[in-house]
């Protein structure tokens, strides 16, 4: 800051926070960073100028943060994740800086609207769904809690595909998110590492008889860092998200292998850069794709080399203390090759003994599991693995040898157990079991909700739990209240803050204070008004986008999440058709008006999920255009559900659909976002639903369906879905209609696969839960008729959601697993 002679202060253009300075800074960035002036500026230029102005203010804090962490010899969390589903940055950063209102005025002075500029930002869709979004919430909380942390991941050139709906079907488009430039990232070419692939290994012995292994790869790729600053809420701490981008390694390919073959060399270059080209759009495991393994190893190797660089060069420490410097968290098994890679780096490249390296590795890593579906556990066939990572396969064999020796000592005559716990699956096509590797190479393993952790330790990871129960713990997921309340629901934020102040934003348990107003008629009326205004705003938006007219007074019944059979969007459809049939058989029936909202992407190769999307849109067609319905039921499918649309959807919902088959949804996090925004939940006893219901009170939650235990028992004794079809005339009619083409203009083939699956297998027990679901929905409607009661329940839901802040989750990881402490960063200004 400069001081002028008369002592009045002139703010620096890049750090000042007054309206006048921000106004100047916007023009300055437009001119000197973008080379534009008002007459040539596009809407995107307006956005970029504001974004650069915000970024300048982050960079100041980022430098202060790095200095503070180095000075304090900080212990660092390294969150390794193949996905970070960030959502747009601008609004979030303005909130965290406390600069929304000054920036609004600065933008006003150019005759523009800040809301339009915020809307202009696209989103980095570098994730599929829950797991990727969780990583984004966690890095927000870590910065807000002042925990030194780095997020490590992949800078996909194409993120999750865009979804269009054409004739009711999902059509995919590519996500060119970098096309208009990304003002939030900094290219760090000086942080570039080599990543090797393929080839073979050779062992050698030196004069002392020491054995060592040399890996002779046949290919190498360079990984270049791109850093995005992640600022905490109203603190100076600015952590980094470091994403790796693949670049061809000229020296390697051009000189060593391709002399004389210029075209071949260029092709190799293109192949190299393919590694970070595109995000795999499956949110459950897709079997054995070479490129996927290359991606995983690529970002893990870059990240570990970077951590070693930090340890040796920035912290001036030794590798003996690596595990004291870093807590490495593996977000599912996707980065679990890190265990073998750290061993390789320490033993092969830094000459450490196997035993010391293993000690360091185990103390460095911890593993979070996100799935119970046994078919979703990651494995790699041995031939594929060996051809991509021959040295790592040897290391995994060696880890396995040491490990199985211990197992054998503990369970001398239990060969079956040995076979189950082996890192190598020898039944059928031999493969590497990444979950086993992750368990063995980590000092802590956790599930993401209480039920999930219970089932994990009782089923898929039971042997590992038996072997080392002390490693296992539960860490129930959470979501960040900054993005999922403050940013997305300004009306609710204002009302809450008016009543209880703003401490809830960083201590969500403070919402408890709202309970005192749950019976206050005036407060109830205002709460109701907030929800209604949110619905009106989104109804207007939807009308604008699609021409569909929504009734804001109707009950907004919402299910947004990836399309999956186990998430049972189809059960929701069965309910809609049931209501429709009630109207058809008595058009004058008194029925609660409902708007059914769906959103979510189906993996492009997932036939059944795509057919469910088509069914939703076909039912919408029929219901929305039937004169008998008279607008009392509306069905809409929001195309391309993403973080940005989430900002609109959660605040407008009255009812949150969390209806997965019990025992299959590890946690769910959308369930938390809805309830925090005042929606009531209709749900099964699955994932975090159970804990949400415990917190908000069972009288404020619409429960239905079989428990996980009952599901298992029913399957055990032989489940026959046809029994339910034969014994329930209402259900029978619904299924017959779908089958006979009632929703497909007479085409009796179209939806046959869906009905066939329900009648012959019904793997996810929709028919078993149907009646219970309908009964619960009827109770929902009944409750809705008493609007004051409904609103009271809504208030109590929000008041009691404190537990589900990602701040709480991160604090638990910090204390129980990572053993890291906050470091507060003073302002340099
Ligand atoms: C793996 C290998 C190859 C290709 C793709 C994948 C892959 C990618 C993404 C496998 C799984 C995912 C994502 C899984 C996921 O999002 N799981 C969800 O995690 C949430 C956060 O813990 C939970 O709330 C959800 O219950 C869980 O389904």
Image (spheres, helix red, strand yellow):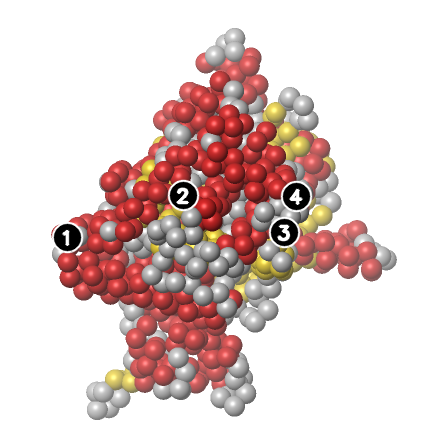
Spatial separation of the CA atoms under disc 4 and disc 2: 30 Å
Q: Comparing marks 3 and 2, which lies closer to the viewer?
A: 3
Q: Can you tell which mark lies on residue 745?
A: 3
**Disc 3 residue crowd, few under 14, some 14–19, many 20+, Cα 10 Å:** few
**Disc 4 residue crowd, few under 14, some 14–19, many 20+, Cα 10 Å:** some
Residue 49 vertical placement versus 472 (above, below): below
Spatial separation of the CA atoms under disc 2 and disc 1: 27 Å
Q: Comparing marks 4 and 2, which lies closer to the viewer?
A: 4
User: Where is residue 547 shown, x and y percent of the image?
Assistant: 50, 68
User: Where is residue 297 shown, x and y percent of the image?
Assistant: 59, 44
Viewer-closest of 582 and 462:
582
Residue 535 vertical placement versus 447 (above, below): below
Viewer-closest of 581 and 510:
581
Picture quarter with the N terminus = bottom left
Q: Can you tell which mark lies on residue 658?
A: 2
Residue at 29% across, 46% down:
782
Circle 3: element type:
loop
Q: Tell whether label 1 touches label 2 (CB within 8 Å).
A: no
Q: Can you tell which mark lies on residue 741?
A: none
> Tag 2 or tag 3, which sits nearer the N-term?
2
- The answer to whether residue 561 is visible is yes
Viewer-closest of 130 and 576:
576
- The answer to whether residue 227 is visible is no
Q: Comparing marks 1 and 4, which lies closer to the viewer?
A: 4
Residue behind mark 4: 748
């Amino acid at each position: 800051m400069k001081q002028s002679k008369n002592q009045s202060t002139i703010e620096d253009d890049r750090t000042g926070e007054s309206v006048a300075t921000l106004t100047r800074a916007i023009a300055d960035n437009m001119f000197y960073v973008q080379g534009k002036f008002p007459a040539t500026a596009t809407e995107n230029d307006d956005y970029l100028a504001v974004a650069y102005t915000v970024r300048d203010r982050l960079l100041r804090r980022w430098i202060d943060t790095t200095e503070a962490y180095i000075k304090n010899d900080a212990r660092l969390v390294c969150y390794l994740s193949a996905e970070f589903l960030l959502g747009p940055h601008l609004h979030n950063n303005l909130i965290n800086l406390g600069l929304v209102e000054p920036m609004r005025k600065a933008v006003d002075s150019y005759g523009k609207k800040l809301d339009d500029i915020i809307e202009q930002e696209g989103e980095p869709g570098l994730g599929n769904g829950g797991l990727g979004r969780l990583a984004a919430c966690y890095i927000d909380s870590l910065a807000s809690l002042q925990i030194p942390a780095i997020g490590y991941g992949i800078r996909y050139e194409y993120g999750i595909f865009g979804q269009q709906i054409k004739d009711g079907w999902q059509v995919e488009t590519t996500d060119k998110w970098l096309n208009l430039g990304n003002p939030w990232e900094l290219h760090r070419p000086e942080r570039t590492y080599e990543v090797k692939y393929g080839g073979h290994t050779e062992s050698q012995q030196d004069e002392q008889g020491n054995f060592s292994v040399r890996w002779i790869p046949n290919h190498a790729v360079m990984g270049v860092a791109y850093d995005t600053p992640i600022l905490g809420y109203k603190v100076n701490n600015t952590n980094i998200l470091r994403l790796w981008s693949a670049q061809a390694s000229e020296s390697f390919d051009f000189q060593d292998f391709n002399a004389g073959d210029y075209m071949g060399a260029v092709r190799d270059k293109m192949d190299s850069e393919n590694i970070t080209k595109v995000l795999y759009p499956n949110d459950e495991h897709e079997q054995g794709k070479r490129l996927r393994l290359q991606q995983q190893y690529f970002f893990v190797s870059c990240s570990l080399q970077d951590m070693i660089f930090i340890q040796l060069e920035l912290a001036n420490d030794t590798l003996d203390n690596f595990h004291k410097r870093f807590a490495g968290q593996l977000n599912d098994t996707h980065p679990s090759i890190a265990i073998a890679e750290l061993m390789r780096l320490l033993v092969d490249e830094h000459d450490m003994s196997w035993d010391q390296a293993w000690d360091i590795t185990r103390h460095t890593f911890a593993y979070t599991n996100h799935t119970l579906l046994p078919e979703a556990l990651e494995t790699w066939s041995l031939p594929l693995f060996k051809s991509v990572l021959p040295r790592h396969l040897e290391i995994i064999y060696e880890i396995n040898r040491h490990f199985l020796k211990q197992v054998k000592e503990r369970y001398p005559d239990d060969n079956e157990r040995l076979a189950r716990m082996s890192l190598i699956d020898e039944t059928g096509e031999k493969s590497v079991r990444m979950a086993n590797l992750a368990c063995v190479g980590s000092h802590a393993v956790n599930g993401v909700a209480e039920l999930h952790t219970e089932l994990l330790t009782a089923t898929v990871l039971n042997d590992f739990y038996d072997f080392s129960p002390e490693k296992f713990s539960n860490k129930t997921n959470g979501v960040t209240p900054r993005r999922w309340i403050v940013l997305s629901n300004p009306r609710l934020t204002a009302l809450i803050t008016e009543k209880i102040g703003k401490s809830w934003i960083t201590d969500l348990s403070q919402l408890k204070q709202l309970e005192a107003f749950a019976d206050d008629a005036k407060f109830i009326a205002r709460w109701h008004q907030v929800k209604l205004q949110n619905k009106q705003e989104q109804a207007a938006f939807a009308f604008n986008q699609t021409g569909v007219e929504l009734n804001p007074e109707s009950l907004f019944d919402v299910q947004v999440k990836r399309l999956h059979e186990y998430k049972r969007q189809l059960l929701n459809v069965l309910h809609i058709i049931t209501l429709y049939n009630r109207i058809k058989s008595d058009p004058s029936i008194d029925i609660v008006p409902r708007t059914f909202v769906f959103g979510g992407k189906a993996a492009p190769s997932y036939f059944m999920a795509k057919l469910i999307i088509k069914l939703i849109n076909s039912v919408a067609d029929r219901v929305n255009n039937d004169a008998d319905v008279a607008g009392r039921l509306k069905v809409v499918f929001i195309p391309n559900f993403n973080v940005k649309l989430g900002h609109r959807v959660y605040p407008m919902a009255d009812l949150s659909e969390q209806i997965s088959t019990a025992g299959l949804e590890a946690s769910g996090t959308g369930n938390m976002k809805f309830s925090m925004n005042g929606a009531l939940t209709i749900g099964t006893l699955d994932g975090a639903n159970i804990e949400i219901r415990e917190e908000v009170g069972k009288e404020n939650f619409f429960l239905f369906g079989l428990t996980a235990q009952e599901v298992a028992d029913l399957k055990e004794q032989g489940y026959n879905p046809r029994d339910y079809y034969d014994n329930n005339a209402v259900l029978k009619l619904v299924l017959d209609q779908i089958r006979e083409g009632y929703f497909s203009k007479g085409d009796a083939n179209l939806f046959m696969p869906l009905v066939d699956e329900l009648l012959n297998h019904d793997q996810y027990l929709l028919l078993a839960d149907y009646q219970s679901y309908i009964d619960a929905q009827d109770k929902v409607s009944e409750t809705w008729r008493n609007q004051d009661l409904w609103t009271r329940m809504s208030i109590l839901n929000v008041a009691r959601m404190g537990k589900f802040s990602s701040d709480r989750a991160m604090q638990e990881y910090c204390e129980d697993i990572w053993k890291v402490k906050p470091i507060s960063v003073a302002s340099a200004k």
